[in-house]
Image: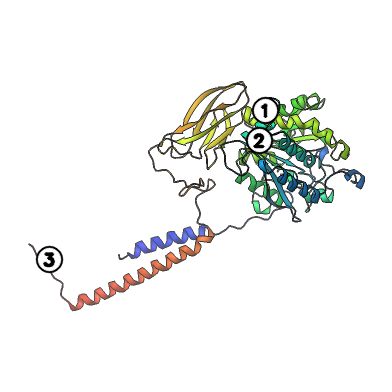
Amino acid sequence: MAISRLGFLSLLLLVLLRAFASLPTQAAARGGSDSSGIDNGKHGAFSRILLEDNPEITEEMTRGYMSNSELENAIQGFGNKCSNVSRIYSIGRSVNGSPLWVIEVSDKPGQKEAEPAFKFIGNVHGDEPVGREVLMQLAYWLCDNYLKDPLVCKATLIVENMHLHILPTMNPDGFALRRRGNANNIDLNRDFPDQFFPINDEISFRQPETRAIINWIKQEHFTASASLHGGALVANYPWDGSRDKRKQYYGCPDDKTFRYMASVYSQSHYNMSLSKEFKGGITNGALWYPIYGGMQDWNYIHGGCFELTLEISDLKWPKASELLVIWEQNKMSMLNLVASLVKTGVHGRIFASDSGRPIPGSLMVKGIDSKISASRTLGDYHRMLTPGETYEVVASMEGFRPRSTRIVLEQEAMNLDFILDPDGQKKPLHNDCGCHCDDDVGGKPFLIRESHLWLYLLVLFVLLALYLLSKRRRTASKLAAHRIPLKRPVAV
């Protein structure tokens, strides 16, 4: 078929625009701090007492703690001993190349199930090593107590009804160097993109440990999480900073639910709730001391994951002989917090009425300005909510009519499935990975990826060949018209 010159030029222009739009844009270089006064990973205007590194950490202080190689051996040993309820995997490497090992505890480790997932992260700061020791104790306790009487022991409840992921150390280099920051001396809990003061949201400029956590959250469908720190005794919840940088209570949309979760931990602790500094043993981060670039706020905003920052030891580096005592003091708090994912909240799946297949919709609660997404493969969602309240829950997805229902959430969890009807309009196709075949990517107009640029160049070459062929044929036709008289149409 001949292509008109105007049509060809229009098509050529469209393809060129789409192709060049896919080329990467220049990212601004990451600086130390901007006009907002936010410190980029180092001590600055918003320092808390906890930011101060300990006095010189002596060999005597570190005696009894596992070294990085000993911790790695312990993790691999756990995987061998408890292979029936665990798997070991790495989410990346530190600056100096140490693998960031994760222990997944579940009766079906590595499999996708319509169950909530929780993650624990220890040793975010290199000079706060208590978390790495306590988390290994937690893993072994779950393994040793699995299949015991579930009325007494929570191990069976946790192993069979959820997936627990444990990262004992996020900062092995900082631990080895006996300092707060990583090998580049960057505070990893100030290195995440911040909602109030985005110095540079380009992920490639983050530390490798930070990027590993970000990619991990994108890959897994975490419902909630907690990071373990030392230097105080309190359960901290979002927001960690405020828009005007003042020290004040600055609650997130799910403030009531976060206070409930923090109280679950504090009230289960042997003395955290008795704190004279923090009422009930819990605190809003911005009220305690504002920080920016923190991990828990990023989890909530970008992962729909409800994360707490748990300060579990008054001392950053207590004597190793005290570690078992600290574990016992925090054991029920950790177990109750993880078990709360199963024992409370709203859980269910979202289906399409026309196909009966699960769909990756989203869930909102009226009056709470946040939403969570259902999983891409199974369409399951797990929404943390404060018990004893009435909620109007809304499930939605592009191409379908939203559906809402009012519930009264008692002290126990509620199961609630949604079946959404197509809205009758053309909707994007979804493959088995939950990817949109003709939808926007990340809320931005779809851009042709640079790796596909060669394909568009090939298309341009074919179109150009067709155009030249068409032009040649038209020239030949004109020459022929001068030699052969045109025939008139014949009436029949």
Q: Earlier in the sequence, mark 1 or mark 3?
A: 1
Q: Which mark is residue 489?
A: 3
Kindly state the secondary structure of the residue where label 2 is placed: helix
Are there few (<14), some (14-19), or many (20+) residues within 10 Å of tag 2? many
Residue kind at label 2, given as amino acid type: Val
Residue 24 position by quadrant: bottom right
Q: Tell which residue pokes out farthest to the bottom in this image.
A: 483
Name the residue nearer the viewer: 130 or 14: 130
Kindly state the secondary structure of the residue where label 3 is placed: loop
* Label 2 close to label 1 by CB (< 8 Å): no
Q: Is residue 371 left or right of residue 461?
A: right
Kindly state the secondary structure of the residue where label 1 is placed: loop
Residue marked by disc 1: 150
Residue kind at label 1, given as amino acid type: Pro
Q: Is residue 443 left or right of residue 467?
A: right
Name the residue nearer the viewer: 483 or 424: 424
Residue displayed at 91% across by 47% down:
59
Residue marked by disc 2: 159
| Foreground: disc 1 or disc 3 | 1
> Is 425 above or below relative to 490?
above
Evaluate whether residue 196 shows in this view: no
Residue kind at label 3, given as amino acid type: Pro
Residue 332 in the image: x percent, y percent?
75, 29
State the CA–CA distance, disc 1 to disc 3.
Answer: 93 Å
Q: Earlier in the sequence, mark 2 or mark 3?
A: 2
Residue displayed at 51% across by 45% down:
434
Residue 110 in the image: x percent, y percent?
61, 44
| Foreground: disc 2 or disc 3 | 2
* Label 2 close to label 3 by CB (< 8 Å): no
Q: Quadrant of the C terminus?
A: bottom left
Q: Which mark is residue 415?
A: none
